[in-house]
Image: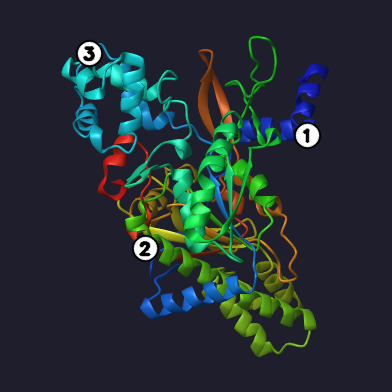
Amino acid sequence: MLSQEDLKQIAQKGMTEEQIKTQLEQFKTGFPFLRLEAAAGIDHGIMVPGKNERAAYEKAWTDYKAEGRRVVKFVPASGAASRMFKDMFAFLDADYDMPTTDFEKHYFENLENFAFYGALNEQCLKNEGKSIKELIAENNYKAVVSNMLEAKGLNYGQLPKGLLLFHKYENGSRTPMEEHLVEGALYAASNSESHVHFTVSHEHMPLFRQMVETKAESYAKTYGIAYDITFSEQKPSTDTIAANTDNTPFRTEEGHLLFRPGGHGALIENLNEIDADVIFIKNIDNVVPDRLKADTVEYKQVIAGVLVTLQQKAFNYLRLLDTGAYTHEQLEEIIRFVQQDLCCRKHDIKNLEDAELVIYLRNKLNRPMRVCGVVKNVGEPGGGPFLTYNQDGTVSLQILESSQIDKSNKEYMEMFTNGTHFNPVDLVCAVKDYQGQPFCLPEFVDKTTGFISSKSKGGKELKALELPGLWNGAMSNWNTVFVEVPLSTFNPVKTVNDLLREQHQ
């Protein structure tokens, strides 16, 4: 099935023939749905710290940073913003010239409220010889949109979200990348340094670097810190092979194998290369202006405080187990910690002998840990917090996407649709063990949690393989804890008109 030419192409991507055979086999067998116990809720699996507890966790985080720890803010930022402008691309292609849909009308009625209005006006003057107001006065709405989307103007249809102007300030407008630099200074700085890492696509790397060169110094002065801003690209070796509908390798017109990016789950490799004690993860578009940052900053410190508090307990228990000098009562205490604090349960734990029990507890304690902020469900798309069965038969907290749930199982669908919370991608991660050594994160991926989707290339249908998602299957075998955070900390921008919401004005 694979020719010598194919094997050469595979090797050039840093992949092996074995990997490709495994992926082709996955197209045939598919991926199993996850077995669910329940949706996580406030009474089972989601912490809701009160005011005094929040203050204690914030202090724990401040104390932890004072020990000279290395903290990194990790921002996946490689996606182009084209989906954000889907409705406006449709307007350009429409057989009418006036705003017709509610979306189009809302966009034009509020055009002056967008942070990019001034920059767009400049492009219209340059390319059309007329301002936005003049173009609209003569009903030339499409000229305005083409100057926003196309390369002759702002080129927003091809740029990544991180480089678009999102928020207005008195001294100019800011991009999401800049807002993340500000956040990094406010809650993730230690030793007077803020380490921020962006994953970007290859073609946009020069633009991101250019923005750092022009903007970072002024933020460093404002916040009295030094920035260490780094970038990485998704590795070619994390791409996945495309298949025909009969599960044979899909080939291009030239006869080459077709590879596709393996989804954001591929970024576990990038995350694995970050040198840090603690890593914050947050999506590029979930940012707010300074006037609304207080909740975000407070709760980021709270969930980080929860993380380092739990981690310290886990480390102490691991050191105790290392001594061999523990009592049965101490083992009972560790069991309670694993079951109650880390929400990881083994139904037949009472059947284990002490020696087996110690092996089990060591295994559950000595792994990466993450605390995830979750918000009350208001109907936004996103993964939900669940108690699920793992490969080893234990039950633990996981973030699930709808694709991982068996839609034909009425009980599971009720859990999913009636879930009280969902995950806005608000994570803080501890990635070193109790001896200070970094975990090898790819070893904690549940490889059975990928999924297959239908795509097309050159008019031909194909099957695409998505790797286990970064905060889903790629972190399945981590210790996971959920903390309720306020809805004000979740403000994603899925369409351009979302920038007109009060939270982005």
* Quarter containing the N terminus: top right
Residue lying at the far right of the rendered structure = 4
* Dot placed on the residue nearer the N-terminal end, 1 or 3: 1
Q: Earlier in the sequence, mark 1 or mark 2?
A: 1
Report which residue position mark 3 lands on: 96
Identify the disc placed on residue 295: 2
Q: Amino acid at mark 3?
A: Tyr
Name the residue tied to disc 1: 18
Q: Secondary structure at mark 2?
A: helix
Q: Judge by depth and name the residue closer to the eye, 332 or 158.
A: 158
| 128 to 268, vertically: above or below | above
Q: CA distance from mark 3 to mark 2?
A: 44 Å
Q: Residue at x 42, y 28 (%)?
A: 156
Marks 1/2: CA distance?
Answer: 48 Å
For discs 3 and 2, the disc positioned in front in the rendered view: 2
Q: Secondary structure at mark 3?
A: loop
Instruction: Pinpoint residue 56: horizontal percent, then vertical percent.
Output: 46, 79
- Report how far apart the C-alphas of labels 1 and 3 lie in the structure: 53 Å
Q: Is residue 465 visible?
A: no
N-terminal-most mark, 3 or 2 = 3
> Which mark is in front, 1 or 3?
3
**83 left or right, relative to 101:** right
Mark nearer the viewer, 1 or 2: 2
From this view, report whether residue 382 is shown above or below residue 367. Answer: above
Q: Amino acid at mark 1?
A: Glu
Label 3, residues with CA under 10 Å away: few <14, some 14-19, many ≥20: few
Q: Position of residue 6 (x, y in %)?
A: 77, 20
